[in-house]
Image (spheres, coloured by chain):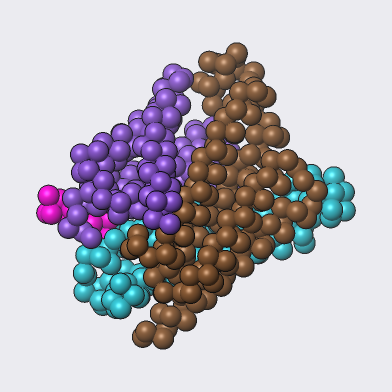
Chain colours: A brown, B cyan, C purple
Amino acid sequence: MMESEVFASFIFYSTVLIIKMYVLAIITGQVRLRKKAFANPEDALRNGGLQYHREDPDVERCRRAHRNDMENIFPFLFLGAIYSLLDPHPVVARIHFIIFCVGRIIHTVAYLLKLKAPTRSVAYSVAQLPCFSMALQILVAVIKFW
Amino acid sequence: MMESEVFASFIFYSTVLIIKMYVLAIITGQVRLRKKAFANPEDALRNGGLQYHREDPDVERCRRAHRNDMENIFPFLFLGAIYSLLDPHPVVARIHFIIFCVGRIIHTVAYLLKLKAPTRSVAYSVAQLPCFSMALQILVAVIKFW
Amino acid sequence: MMESEVFASFIFYSTVLIIKMYVLAIITGQVRLRKKAFANPEDALRNGGLQYHREDPDVERCRRAHRNDMENIFPFLFLGAIYSLLDPHPVVARIHFIIFCVGRIIHTVAYLLKLKAPTRSVAYSVAQLPCFSMALQILVAVIKFW
């Protein structure tokens, strides 16, 4: 499995995106500390007092970016793995993975840097194209098999 | 792997549910545009002004449906894949997958159409049954192997 | 696949954590009923009236714990599966899985019981260590293969 070129390429881009999500979680924690905005009273107490148990727009922005990642990167981990089993052309497969990976990285950057609309939505939509393509190819392959 | 009847059936229902989630994301975007309720100031600015940077109950409803999907469909993608490796009877396996798939589709419809309680909760609970069943069968198989 | 010791061990801890998440969802529902705090008007109507369509700090605490699980356990399901394919030493692999599993269980307990900070954050950080380790080992293996 690890010796398939397509699968190795899928693994690479998937792992990069998971690390990107971990980095986003770390950034969220740093913004919470810097803006002094904690979701839990016990965290606020440890960091200056209960008045810091509050919401902050920059923290919420990080959380929205992270949630959007979950909505989109997790399904990619599934679709990409199954798609890799369909024996697609390595170059075509890699184009799918790269478009998704770059689209999602731009999405996060656009979210955190508050880039002008519609940068973020365009990045989201472009990243969805390879996902729709893989989902359809998987359905066609399964239906053919039946 | 793709030539196993059980695995093919699992792939089919999983991919249908992922597409269902993608459609829910598109519906959320459409409701945001129609109700003029944007999570980010930069989106509101592009769509009429900062006064549209606000929450809306219909948008929040879509987001709750989507979040519930993540809480339940993503674990199914894992459990179903491992369960398929256990070589279950194809008919029994397919019953597991169909109950989950239909339950989750009814859950989304009940959420978006605000169907009377407890329609949505019943759909959720019924869809959890095959998940619990698969999780237990996986644990039994692993413990037997040890 | 099921006959690999590493993979069986991964499957065991993953399934335990998914069941842990299912239990958390059930607890959330019980807290909603006990505190009479429902996210949807249709649920409130069935449980005493629209005045119970409201937020509650204990419900929100459960939801934050669940969301943090999604952010961390779902990527583990992916990384752990790929890492198992890399043929790691069974003892080393099991140490990775156990640290993650125990860390995440302590995280949930610390969240729900409102344990003093930084118990929860320490559990989170310790559980991330095997994830970072697996992600790096996967990247190294893929890059070597190319």
Q: Find out whether residue B135 is within the magenta segment.
A: yes
Identify the residue at horizontal 54%, vertical 62% (top origin): A97
Q: Does residue C126 sit above or below B77 in this rendering?
A: above
Identify the residue at horizontal 44%, vertical 66% (top origin): A6
Identify the residue at horizontal 47%, vertical 81% (top origin): A140
Asked if residue A114 lies left or right of residue B23, the reply is right
> Quarter of the image holding residue C57?
top right
Dominant secondary structure of the residues highlighted in magenta in the image: helix
Q: Position of residue A39 (x, y in %)?
A: 57, 29
Identify the residue at horizontal 45%, vertical 20% (top origin): C118
Q: Position of residue A110 (x, y in %)?
A: 71, 47
**Which residue range is magenta in the image?**
B134-146
Q: Does residue A48 sit above or below B122 in this rendering?
A: above
Asked if residue C16 lies left or right of residue B11, the reply is left
Quadrant occupied by the C terminus of chain A? bottom left
Quadrant occupied by the N terminus of chain A? bottom left
Q: Find out whether residue A33 is within the magenta segment.
A: no
